[in-house]
Amino acid sequence: MLMIKTRFLLLGLLFMNQISFSQTGIFHWADEDEEMIHNRIIDIKQLSDQSLVVLSKLEDENYENMFPAITKMRTNGDMILSKFIERYHLYELNGALIQPDQNIRIFGTEMSTTNGLTPYYDWISQLGLVIPTKSTMSAQPTFIGDLQMIGDAAVILKSVINKSKKYNLIVNKIIPSLTDSVLWTCKIESAHHEEGNKIVFLDDGAILILARSYTDETMDHFTAVIYKISKAGKLLWSKELSDVKDYFSHSLLTDHSGNLIYSFSFSDDENGECHTMMRKLDADAKMISEKRIDGIRSNSMIQLTNGNVLIAGCGFVDYPEYFLTKAKNLVLSNSDFSVVNEFGLSSQTQPETDFPVQEIAYMPASSEYFCATLLTDGTVSLGGRALLPIKSDPLKLLKSPRRNENLLVILNDKGEL
């Protein structure tokens, strides 16, 4: 049986001491548990009252334990509540879902003592209470890739071991509840191990699935593949992007004109600096154009209300012996992917300006974005992490330990701070 421990904190002095409030739209904070020193935001959703639900992944120093944390807050940085769930055996945490009743559902994959990988879900009320549920253990090893709402229904993307001992994709459309009523199931057969990454909905109700297809039995090398499923759950076509190999991350969206935009980050530099390739595809995933964007590793991509595309991840600062990652986002023109504007964290911005100059100069803060969300008013929220001093001691400025704090940045509707 999993050991579960929950903590519920309302807004108060304890939280006020932990959050750095900002007039610029940059916020950072860490969980109060001193053992969970690696904090990062992996998903941001918005409730009907316009408040944000921020899902964080908390890990200990050796990355041996992983726990989810939910923070409910307003876009001006005011904290409403926080929920920490101590979940042992959690293998991966993927995202959060706002259900029609406005309850929060977080999802991922956990390790079972009997079947190996199995789906993980927790339901949390708006008051921060964990809602008791039945076990979600699967009959076969199962890895959850994505879960997205479409109207009052939801679509779940899974990788499940089949009879040939291959991880293949299964897509379920459900009516979300504590028991999840299944409307249809689409099984996507492949001779390779495949890992589902992202669900994209089209205007006609069809669904695109972005996945990773492994090209060897050891699962060391892989390429990208896109599947299209009808709104009734029938597989229509597949498109392997065979020239996209061993990338760091990739993303897919459909733009206002019905074309697809696909991005992937990669490195062809022995020093480890990463770049991003932007591709425009037609509705059948055939190439229209592409452009390489140097110096940024993109982890997330959204389309702004004006049609431009925002990518978010990290840039690279060249130090004598290493590259330092810095959270960075670019706004690109949808027509030719030219750079419209960009913003990156630096020693002249928060969160680094919240600490003594000597301390940051000795060990500059690294940072990175992992998710981007378009909010209902057209503004943008970016979530990630920043490696910062745990506690400034005037006598030990150069020796203070570091931890990764949650990093939240709010941009306007043009993708500007």
Image: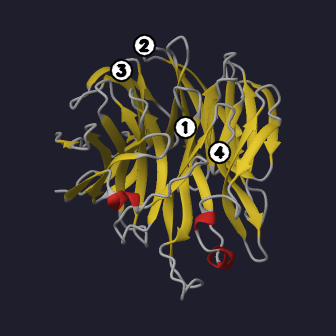
Q: Amino acid at mark 3?
A: Ala
Q: CA distance from mark 3 to mark 1?
A: 22 Å
User: Residue at point 29% right, 42% down?
Assistant: 121
Mark nearer the viewer, 3 or 1: 3
Q: Which residue is more in the foreground, 356 or 248? A: 356
Q: Which residue has dot 1 on it?
A: 211
Type of amino acid at the residue the image marks with label 2: Ala
The residue positioned 50% from the left and 54% from the top of the image is 21
Viewer-proximal residue, 90 or 391? 391
Q: Position of residue 410 (x, y in %)?
A: 58, 42
**Mark positioned earlier in the residue sequence (2 or 1):** 1
Residue found 44% across the figure and 36% down from its top: 45
Question: Of marks 3 and 4, which one's residue comes earlier in the chain?
Answer: 3
Residue 375: x and y, percent? 53, 31
Camera-nearest label, 2 or 3: 3
Q: Mark 3 Cα within 10 Å, few/some/many (few <14, many 20+)? A: some
Disc 2 target residue:
232
Residue position for label 3 = 153
- Residue under pointer 4: 312
Of the residues under marks 1 and 4, which one precedes in the sequence?
1
Nearer to us: label 3 or label 4: 4
What kind of residue is marked 4?
Ala
The count of marks equals 4
Q: Nearer the N terminus, badge 4 or badge 2? A: 2
Front position among marks 4 and 2: 4
Determine crowd level at label 2: few under 14, some 14-19, many 20+ residues with C-alpha closer than 10 A: some
Residue at (28%, 37%) from the top-left corner?
Answer: 126
Picture coordinates of residue 243, whole percent (x, y): 73, 41
